[in-house]
Amino acid sequence: MSSSPHQSTRPLMTSARVHPSYLPFIHNASRSTGKGMKWVPPLVTLVGVGYGVAAYREAQIGKHLAETAAAEKAETERRRKNAALADAYGDRNSIEALEHAMRVYEAQQGNE
């Protein structure tokens, strides 16, 4: 056999690295915690978005309740004024009430 300058005189061998017996277990343990950690940022983001939506919804409900309370107060005031006008001018259920309302109206017109 002739030897060429590119051929090695040593035979080609492969050999696996030899590790201490505990090293593969440590390596696998670090992999398992790494896989769980990749879900932490999306989970934190999801919780943050959920909190933001809940806070916004609660604020909208509070705003709606405040508007409803203001509308109910305005409606109560309108009914009170209408009742006062009905008392002052009569409710027009009878001729006597209508005549009384006309007298009150004419008295008010004369005062102005």
Image: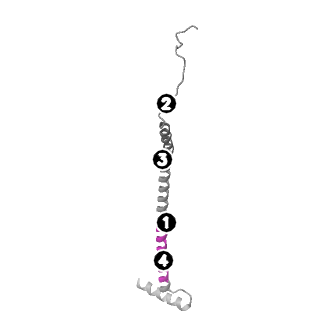
Residue type beneath disc 2: Val
Which one is earlier in the sequence, the residue at label 1 or at label 3? 3
Residue type beneath disc 3: Pro
Which one is earlier in the sequence, the residue at label 2 or at label 3? 2
Q: Nearer the viewer, mark 2 or mark 3?
A: 2
What is the spatial separation of the Cα atoms under label 2 and label 3, in whole angstroms? 37 Å
Residue 83, magenta (yes or no): yes
Q: Nearer the viewer, mark 3 or mark 4?
A: 3
- Tell me the magenta residue range: 63-85
- Crowding around mark 1 (Cα neighbors within 10 Å: few <14, some 14 to 19, many 20+) is few
Residue 6, how many percent across, how many down? 53, 12
Instruction: Choose between 92 and 75: the one closer to the eye.
Output: 75
- Crowding around mark 4 (Cα neighbors within 10 Å: few <14, some 14 to 19, many 20+) is few
Q: Nearer the viewer, mark 1 or mark 3?
A: 3
Q: Nearer the viewer, mark 2 or mark 1?
A: 2
Residue type beneath disc 1: His
Kindly identify which residue carries mark 1: 64
Kindly identify which residue carries mark 2: 18
Kindly identify which residue carries mark 4: 76
Residue that extends furthest to the bottom in the rendered view of this protein: 96
What is the spatial separation of the Cα atoms under label 1 and label 4, in whole angstroms? 18 Å
Residue 6, magenta (yes or no): no
Which one is earlier in the sequence, the residue at label 4 or at label 2? 2
Residue type beneath disc 4: Thr
What is the spatial separation of the Cα atoms under label 1 and label 3, in whole angstroms? 35 Å
